Image: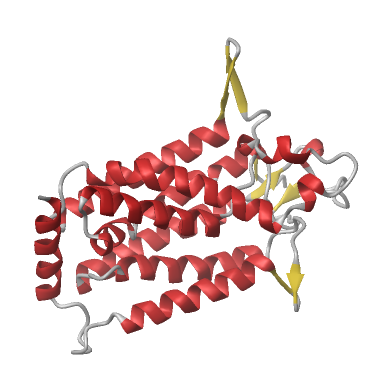
Amino acid sequence: MLLASIPSPSRGVIHLGPVPIRAYALCIIAGVIVAVIVGDRRLQRRGGPKGAIADVATWAVPFGLVGARLYHLATNPELYWGGPGRSGTLGALKIWDGGLGIWGGVLFGALGAWIACRRYHLSYAMVADALGPAMPLAQAVGRWGNWFNQELYGRPTGLPWKLHIDLARRIPGYLNVAYYQPTFLYESIWDVGVALAVIAADRKVHYTRGRAFALYVMLYTVGRGWIEALRIDDAHKFFGLRLNDWTSIAVFVAALVYYVATRPRSGAGDAPGDATMDQTEGHTLAT
């Protein structure tokens, strides 16, 4: 019996005349659009002004892309400056070929969002809570860019949902293996689940103080740790764990500390009164 498999696209670039349209970039753009739509609706329900998330995105997205690329370059410099045959600084600038680190993207994106909130007189915590489920949805869409680039796949597998990788895209040492774990798909599904979990928890608890965003971070890092264990691409390891695993652990702990530290002293969760206060703050700051 023949097993089913997930085919990889034969190419990730479409040319409209002399202009290359890269699927990787389109996935990122689509993810941003999803985040803006979802985040803006949530912000309005919290009392924020309509269209504010789009204003925040004009700062957060460029900062996030720069941060994501810098994280990738800082943790994988040998891919560009490691010796003969490397692409050097010119290759380091080719962001469309892949190579974005989510950790740098979130950190720098948060900085860009903070600047935007200061500029447009928005509550930073309220914006963060609005983006809590919007961010993982954006990541769920953006991960399909890895599918188009045939990159960051997992170990060889014979599962029915195995992913076919073209010979030119296989990692040295696996040239005779055609099928791999579709980690892009796993993370995309996990991210959707994270978004739904944050939405469900927020409806019950009515998060304020950025706690919905902290919950997203915690849930995402748990899944990322599992997915990292499946990947076979080269990575720096410390005490048997990949660098991204250690980063996930550190980020999870930081988000957990924030989540617990900002919990209302009553111990009953974020009361509706807290949500009303957050909405009032948003109205005041937006004027």
Q: Quadrant of residue 5?
A: top right
Picture layout, residue 47 above or below residue 3: below
Picture layout, residue 2 above or below residue 234: above
Q: Quadrant of residue 74?
A: bottom right
Of residues 238 and 12, which is closer to you in this image? 238
- Residue at the (80%, 47%) spot, across then down: 81
**Residue 110 position in % (x across, y down):** 40, 57
Of residues 1 and 164, which is closer to you in this image? 164
Of residues 168 and 282, which is closer to you in this image? 282
- Residue at the (72%, 51%) spot, across then down: 180
Q: Is residue 121 visible?
A: yes
- Residue at the (45%, 42%) spot, across then down: 62
**Residue 230 position in % (x across, y down):** 68, 63
Q: Is residue 178 visible?
A: no
Q: How many marks?
A: 0
Looking at the image, residue 257 sits to the left or right of residue 42; the answer is right
Q: Find the residue positioned furthest to the top.
A: 17
**Residue 233 position in % (x across, y down):** 75, 55
Q: How is the image coloured?
A: secondary structure
Looking at the image, residue 218 sits to the left or right of residue 260; the answer is right
**Residue 59 position in % (x across, y down):** 37, 44
- Residue at the (61%, 42%) spot, across then down: 147
Q: Find the residue positioned furthest to the bottom.
A: 266
Of residues 46 and 111, which is closer to you in this image? 111
